Every structure is written in C-alpha cells, then in structure tokens.
Amino acid sequence: MRLRFALIAWMGACMAGVMAVAAGTSGAQQGGAPRPAAAGTSGAQQGGAPAAADAGEERPLDAEPFPAEPSKQPTAAEWKTAPRVRLSRAGPAAAGCRAYRMREWLRIRCPELTVSAISLLGGKTEGVAFWIDPPRGGSELPRGGEVMFPIRRGDRRVIQILTFGPGYDGPFTLLPAIVVQEQWLDDEPAPTVTAS
C-alpha cells in the first residue's frame, strides 16, 4: 500500500513539473537530451550556441542568392556571424524559434522549446543534422534544440520536433511540437520553408 501511495505521489510530482514547464512557455514550447545527428553529420559542431546575429533584423530567406554549387557545412564560427532570416511561414508553435542562413545552409534554433526528439520524416538526408541542448539551470528537462540542413533546388524535407506532455503514456508522452517543411521545386525561383 505504501508503495502504491509513493508511486502516485511520484507521478503527481512529475506531472506538476511538466505542467510548470508548459505554463512558462507558449503552446508546445518545451527540451530533451542530446541526440546523435542524422545522416552521419554532427549537431555538436554547432554546440547549441546562439548566433551572434540574434540582435539583427530578419531578412527574407532568399535575400541573398543561393549558390549554384553545393558548399561545405558551415563551421561553428561561421554560424556565429550568420544573419537571421524569415521563414516563408511560421505558426504560433514556432514563435520562439529563430532561423539563420549561411550560403545554402539553414539552421532553425528553438532555444526555449523542451525538445524530447527530432526526426526526419521524409526527404533527403544529406547534410541534415539535429541537436538537443543538455539540461540547464537545475532542470531535469533540457530546453533548446535545433535542426540544420542545406536548401538546394529539387530538395524536399519534412522534419518533426517533439516535446513532452501528458498523454496515454503518462506525463512524459512524446508529443509533436513543430513540423518543419522545406521544398524547392525545379520551376520555382526560391525555396519554401515553413515551421508550424
């Protein structure tokens, strides 16, 4: 009987912690543990460090022409100087996220989202990398995550960012938070990138 009450108390404490985290963010904004990057790339190269260009205004995604030839993945130092760009569309769930572009590479960073997992649902895997920040500030649930990928003519991708929340699997059910969609059709002058 004591074990049952201890378990119920523990589950209640976990649920209260998750609800407290959720109350401090908008919509599906919440974090997770570092995960390996997809397609053999290294998300740790970016290290989750915010870009220095955060203070600048957002430029249109296609303000600078995209290079005709593929370039190498930007270094951490290059990302620090990358300008912020405005996605084609962003929904309320992605309001706290910021996008940066370096050559044809795009990095979408959500510093306050509690990310439980990131996955590529479909599309090209080449150059795709994920990063989930480790816990900070004494919290067991980390905040912050990012996804990076190249945008090249003919590309199509769908990436899902998941968070934690109450559900059938308990207080730490994995729930969809943001879906990033990228496509650049051959007959279009510029790509379309959305986050909602």
Image (spheres, grey):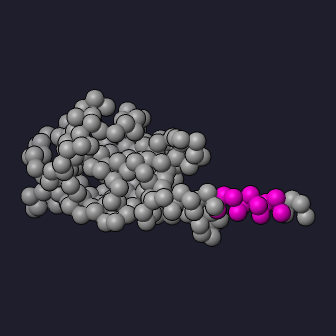
Q: Is residue 9 magenta-colored? A: yes
Q: Is 6 situated left or right of 192 in this image? A: right
Task: Please indicate, yes or no, whether residue 135 appears anywhere in the rendered image.
Answer: yes
Q: In the rendered view, tell whether residue 111 sits above or below residue 19.
A: above
Residue 119's spot in the image, x, y percent?
43, 54
Along the line of sight, which residue is nearer the eye, 52 or 184?
A: 52
Task: Please give the range of residues in magenta.
Answer: 5-15
Q: Is 6 situated left or right of 65 in this image? A: right
Q: Give the residue at x 8% y 58%.
A: 189
In what quadrant of the picture does the N terminus appear? Answer: bottom right
Give the tally of numbered discs.
0
Along the line of sight, which residue is nearer the eye, 144 or 66?
A: 144
Q: Main secondary structure of the magenta part?
A: helix
Along the line of sight, which residue is nearer the eye, 114 or 168?
A: 114
Q: Give the residue at x 58% y 42%.
A: 138
Q: Give the residue at x 14% y 54%.
A: 60
Q: In the rendered view, tell whether residue 64 sits above or below residue 71.
A: below
Q: In the rendered view, tell whether residue 31 sits above or below residue 51.
A: below
In what quadrant of the picture does the C terminus appear? Answer: bottom left
Residue 111's spot in the image, x, y percent?
40, 48
Task: Please indicate, yes or no, whether residue 74 appears anywhere in the rendered image.
Answer: no
The residue sitting at the right extreme is 1
Q: Quadrant of residue 130?
A: top left
Q: Is residue 156 magenta-colored? A: no
Q: Quadrant of residue 160?
A: bottom left
Residue 179's spot in the image, x, y percent?
37, 62
Q: Is 84 situated left or right of 45 in this image? A: left
The residue sitting at the bottom extreme is 168
